[in-house]
């Protein structure tokens, strides 16, 4: 008889641990649901992304790039001769042009 009584006690202890695990899992799920609800509320209150992107784009477009020099034309007009073809193509002896 003691074996039956001890088995009942063991099964009750197992149930207690099972209940604790289930309640812990439920609590964790409730916390996750709460955090997801808070995140959804924050997303609903945010400005649309396209509006923010347009603002940033306009701001970036209006400022010159600090790493690029501002030139209105070529800094040295003699450099242009390297990028232009010859004036008279009959004088050119290269096979590319």
Image (spheres, grey):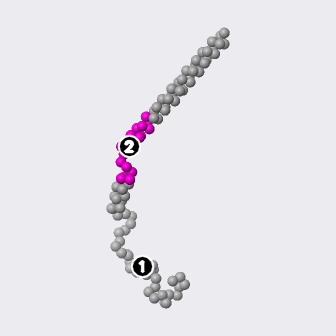
Q: How many marks?
A: 2
- Which quarter of the figure has residue 5? top right
Binning the other alpha carbons within 10 Å of mark 1 as few (below 14), some (14 to 19) or many (20 upward) gives: few
For mark 2, what is the residue? 44
Determine whether, in the image, residue 51 is placed left or right of residue 97: left
Instruction: Quote the CA–CA distance across marks 1 and 2.
Output: 56 Å
Closer to us: 28 or 70 = 28
How would you rate the neighbour count of disc 2 (Cα within 10 Å): few for under 14, some for 14-19, many for 20 or more?
few
Q: Does residue 79 lie above or below 28 as drawn?
A: below
Is residue 15 found inside the magenta-colored segment of the image? no
Q: Which residues are magenta?
A: 34-52
Q: Which residue is mark 1?
A: 79
Which numbered marker is on residue 69? Answer: none
Residue at figure coordinates x 40%, y 81% from the top left: 78
Counting residues from the start of the chain, the first of labels 1 and 2 encountered is 2
Q: Is residue 34 above or below residue 84?
A: above
Check contact, mark 1 vs mark 2: CB within 8 A. no
| Mark 1 secondary-structure assignment | helix
Q: Position of residue 68 (x, y in %)?
A: 38, 66
Return the x and y of residue 76 as percentages of the image width and height: 38, 77
Residue at x-position 52% and y-position 87%: 93
Disc 1 or disc 2, which is closer to the eye?
2
* Residue drawn 36% across the image and 56% down it: 54
Residue occupying the point 41% across, 40% down? 39
Q: Main secondary structure of the magenta part?
A: helix
């Amino acid at each position: 008889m003691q074996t039956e009584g001890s088995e009942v006690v063991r099964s009750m202890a197992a149930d207690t641990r099972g209940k604790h695990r289930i309640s812990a899992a439920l609590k964790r799920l409730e916390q996750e649901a709460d955090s997801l609800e808070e995140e959804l509320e924050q997303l609903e209150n945010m400005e649309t992304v396209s509006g923010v992107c347009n603002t940033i784009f306009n701001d970036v477009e209006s400022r010159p790039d600090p790493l690029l020099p501002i030139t209105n034309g070529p800094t040295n007009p003699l450099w242009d001769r390297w990028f232009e073809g010859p004036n008279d193509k009959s004088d050119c002896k290269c096979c590319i042009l």
